[in-house]
Amino acid sequence: MNDDNNSTQQGVAGHGAFFQDTNLSANEAETATAWVRSHVDRRSVDLGERMDDIRDHMWELEKEGEIIVHRINPEHRAETVQTLYGWDKKIPTNNLWHHKSCGQCGNIPGYPTSLMWFMNKLGIDYLDETDQTSCTAWNYHGSGIGNVESLAAVFLRNFHQAYVSGKQHGFENGHFFPLVHCGTSFGNYKEIRKYLIESAELREKVKKILGKLGRLVDGKIVIPEEVVHYSEWLHVMRNRIASELQVMDMSNIRVTVHAACHYYKMVQEDAVYDNTVLGGNRTAVGTSVAQALGAQVIDYSTWYDCCGFGFRHIISEREFTRSFSMNRKIKVAREEARADVMIGIDTGCITTLDKNQWIGKAHDMNYSIPIIADVQLAALACGADPFKIVQLQWHASPCEDLVEKMGISWDKAKADFQDYLKQVEQGNVEYLYNPELATNQNINMKMVSA
């Protein structure tokens, strides 16, 4: 589209005149999109030359009085894992502050409830309060509206809240450590942490914003020692979960894994790798849980591919997303791996792969496969209710066969859930989490045990 029409014409895919065709050559387009198929693992990444660990600079800034680091303390009971470059990373397992996902809460509610169900079962102390905002990365990637300053301000605002959240419950600052549910938030926050540590100008800009919000501590911004994803918590807890809670035999379940680009391709040096999982060559999260449960983990040729979500084109070029997810992921997992289920570790991936399978029928591509999170599969294996806790009724992909193959009666679970809903209608509500801790309201409640 030429410049003369910019003021009156729509831009690419209806995004507005400021979105224009880049007119990339075929080679340039390939370079720009190569990350979608990139193989980020120990075999393909040059690990010979050590790159900077941003955490080293973070400690220097704290020593200089520039920032406060939200430390992982002994009460967080951290486990140490290794990242792609062999660096140590601490994963706190206790006293956790849930940084929830807008997409999970809105589209896949069994995702966070399965995670909290596990924490209840294992006696993990956590805070699931309401004082949290979306990370805004969806908006940034999906529309281009936003900038580094706004992303950084939201990052720091949320992690400041995590840092001070224990105060209202009688604890010192830093008592609860943030656990990020969403892969998009996780990737975005890692990038933003890097920018903040590297740029004094960015720190100064956001300090002015946070000062107006009352989100500074002693005039300083608060940055967490580690940015931790829920799947990393599940990874370090997997053997305890399998030994203490598992009740279903998973040995006949064929599992494929989709690892989220925002987890291991974005700030790749921070992703967790484990020599006991896939030879240490691919990121461990997701896969390690299925292995610990005794399931058959089946490889497939497009393991590294993006799910097709892509943020902007899920909105404006949705047919590309649908065709990519069907042709590059669902079809391959069915034909090559004959998988009973595909597990993911990120909100957008699971939503894309789960919600778009129906469109294949319009093109005689009748491929379907259950798409759920690693923590949902683990919860099913440990006896969680398929409807009340794992909430499979929210999924568009068919889960009945998977549940039955695991030895769970779908019809009985559905009938029990319908009876439960009648109890809810009469005001007999169960909670996974004490709402008084989240909102400080007096609510009569009982803890759910199913």
Image (tube, helix red, strand yellow):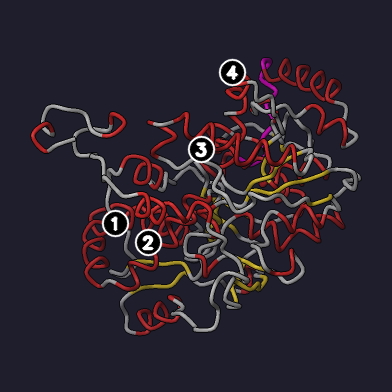
Mark 2 → mark 3, Cα distance in angstroms: 21 Å
In depth, the one of 320 and 342 nearer the eye is 320
* Marks 1 and 4, the one that precedes in the sequence: 1
For residue 148, the mark is: 1
Is the residue marked by circle 3 packed among few (<14), some (14-19), or many (20+) residues within 10 Å?
Answer: some
Which residue type does callout 3 highlight?
Gly
Residue 17 in which image quadrant: top left
Quadrant assignment for the C terminus: top right
For residue 335, the mark is: none
Q: Position of residue 328 (x, y in %)?
A: 60, 41
Report the magenta residues as a range.
425-434
**Residue that badge 2 annotates:** 192
* In this rendering, the label closer to the viewer, 4 or 2: 4
Q: Secondary structure at mark 1?
A: helix
Which residue type does callout 2 highlight?
Ile
**Residue that badge 3 annotates:** 103
For residue 362, the mark is: 4
